[in-house]
């Protein structure tokens, strides 16, 4: 995907989420990961503890990266939370490149 196309699609996803959530500002990457985590766990509450928010974001990252075979879904625990195991090393260096990969996976996630 060319840079201009990536930028357009990423901004489009952010605007869709902003509109759906009725917010005034575009969501950050972390906010989007948090929302995907909520979607994937099915756990909906008014608030989450800090550790739970981190767990939700981890679920989102695993879900997104499972599309490329980095993680494999292994099942849900007694509380319904999904669990994954890493099956392939992620060999993408640098925070910027890793962020870009997650953004591309988010674009694919919302395209489905």
Image (spheres, rainbow, N blue to C red):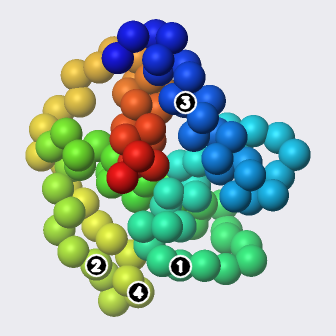
Identify which residue is drawn at 44% across, 41% down: 106
| Residue 102 visible, this angle | no
Q: Who comes first in sequence, dot 3 or dot 1?
A: 3
Q: In which image quadrant can residue 84 be found?
A: bottom left
Q: Secondary structure at mark 2?
A: strand
Marks 2 & 3, CB-CB < 8 Å contact? no
Gap in Å between the C-alphas at discs 1 and 4? 9 Å
| Residue designated by label 1 | 43
Q: Who comes first in sequence, dot 2 or dot 3?
A: 3
Q: Who comes first in sequence, dot 3 or dot 4?
A: 3
How dense is the environment of label 1, judged by Cα within 10 Å: few (below 14), some, or many (20 and up)? few
| Residue designated by label 2 | 76
Gap in Å between the C-alphas at discs 2 and 3? 30 Å
Q: Nearer the viewer, mark 3 or mark 1?
A: 3
Drawn side of residue 14 relative to residue 7, left or right: right
Marks 1 & 4, CB-CB < 8 Å contact? no
| Residue designated by label 4 | 79
Identify which residue is drawn at 19% across, 39% down: 68
């Amino acid at each position: 995907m060319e840079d201009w196309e990536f930028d357009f699609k990423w901004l489009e996803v952010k605007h869709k989420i902003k509109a759906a959530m009725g917010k005034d500002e575009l969501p950050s990457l972390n906010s989007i990961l948090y929302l995907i985590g909520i979607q994937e766990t099915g756990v909906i509450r008014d608030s989450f503890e800090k550790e739970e928010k981190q767990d939700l974001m981890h679920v989102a990252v695993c879900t997104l990266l499972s599309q490329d075979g980095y993680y494999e879904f292994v099942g849900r625990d007694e509380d319904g939370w999904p669990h994954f195991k890493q099956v392939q090393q992620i060999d993408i260096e640098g925070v910027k490149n890793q962020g870009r990969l997650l953004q591309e996976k988010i674009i694919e996630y919302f395209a489905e």
